Amino acid sequence: MRIRHFAIYLVGAAALILAAPAESAPKAPKESWIGAWGFVPTPLPPGMTPALPVTATAAVPMAGTLPAQPATPPPTPPLLDNPGNVPVVTAEADPSNITIRQLVRVAVAGKRIRLRLSNEGGSDVLALGAVHVGAAGPDGSVLAGSDHIVTFDGHGAVTLPGGAPVLSDPVDLKVDALEKLVISIHVPGTLSRAGHSLYQYVSGTAGDQTGAAQLPSQRIMRLTALVTQLEVDPVSANAVVVTLGDSITEGAASTNNAFRGWPDRLAERLAAAKSNWSVVNAGIGGNRLVRYGTGPNALARLDRDVFGVPGVKAIILLEGINDIGRGFTTISPQDPVTLDALIAADKQIIVRAHAHGIRVIGALLTPYQGAANASPAGEQVRTGLNNWIRTGGAFDGVVDFATATADPANPLTFRADFNLRDKLHPNDAGYQAMADAIDLNLFK
């Protein structure tokens, strides 16, 4: 009996020992990251050579458009928020051993941040010597006392595999809604100018300048964006709306580095309303619904650029004008497209989003009569797609960007004061009108 009782005692004691760590071990802090800024990388298909980046004499957000696939060109010249008149360099070979400084704006407040850096447009490894982040001052400077070193698994340097992104360690940097940050990156090797690009500050002195308050002998160049997403550990926000589209969503013809595209203006409205929603921009100039334009089509990039954003709960979809322009163009080879194909693509986005518990808000395509690739046949498809978006009942909500930007005297054309000469892309005022047309009740 004693042996039996002793065996029972041992079994009970072992159970207590095994259970103890689960009860007494300290709990890991809950991770609650959400997207607060985005800029989509655009890997090229195998064997395709990237176009040269758009220069200061041609409008901005179509950089990376393939020569053989000229989606409607944006207007000229570009606008750049550059109060200090920092020199803008447009004709220079791929730079090497430089420090670049990328400007971003955070949609919502956060207790901490982390960065997503991307080499998804490259086939070779990309070594980064150092990364810093801080609050943005004038002309790409870092405000005193705000500079933070960014690490990756505890290390300051990181190597990005070809075709892949990396996430940084959390950075203990508190940010306010709509606060601007600068991310400084030392690239010891050569930085290719392929892929999706932004105007960035570049040091004129070689080597690691990431800790400098102001980059020495700086100039502005349009270079591949290495930071493609910023996430926050939010103060109160708990949901993200991803704006999925082409150049009109990216912000073509708005003032560069001034955050005046319609997604930026929507973020301002949501912040003013003290909503719990963040905004992440997933627009790519030249993008299309069903064919490769600039970057993979919307269906092909849905998983990475939308479902991969932490906290995403809704999409505003504004795609199709490049499919229509290329489908019925009279100035270059056509890529035929039908209204049924565009509707089918929208339905696929909706059903795949709903499978993830994500609502999809359909946006009516803006006017394009008078644009370089406009045609009566294309207008019939644009009108048909807008009618289906408005009345088909497939979307969880609708935004009427068409009426918001149309000339009241001729709704098929852009309002002249909302357009920068090309009859396709809004200017700053046009983007504000688009943001104002969005019913914020969609995000309650």
Image (tube, rainbow, N blue to C red):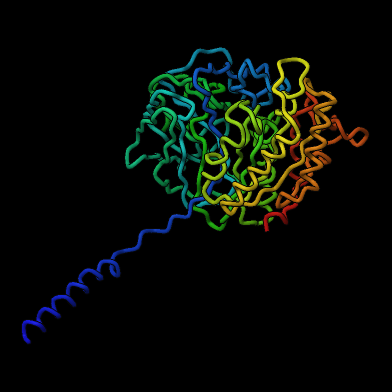
Query: Quadrant location of residue 63?
Result: top right
Q: Position of residue 172 (x, y in %)?
A: 43, 49
Can residue 115 be seen at all in this image of the molecule? yes
Using the image as rendered, state which of residue 326 and residue 53 is in the foreground: 326
Determine if residue 421 is in view.
no
- Residue 220 location (% of width, % of height): 56, 22
**Left or right: 150 with respect to 230?**
left
State left or right for residue 227 relative to residue 261: left
- Identify which residue is drawn at 14% across, 80% down: 9
* 145 or 245: nearer the viewer: 245
Residue at 42 percent across and 40 percent down: it is 167
* Residue plotted at (70% across, 49% down): 269
Query: In the picture, which quadrant includes the C terminus?
Result: bottom right
Q: Residue 409 placed where, x, y %?
A: 93, 34
Q: State the residue lying farthest toward the left.
A: 2
**Callout count:** 0
User: In the rendered image, which quarter is residue 344 located in?
Assistant: top right
For residue 149, side relative to residue 46 (left or right): left
Locate the N terminus and report the quarter of the image it occupies. Answer: bottom left
Name the residue furthest right. Answer: 409
Kindly identify the residue that appears in the image at 32 percent across and 38 percent down.
155
Where is residue 259? Give x, y as percent.
Answer: 65, 37
Q: Nearer the viewer, residue 164 or 266?
A: 164
Asked which quadrant contains residue 199, the reply is top right
Q: Is residue 160 above or below residue 112?
A: above
Closer to the camera in the image, 282 or 82: 282
State left or right for residue 315 relative to residue 34. Answer: right
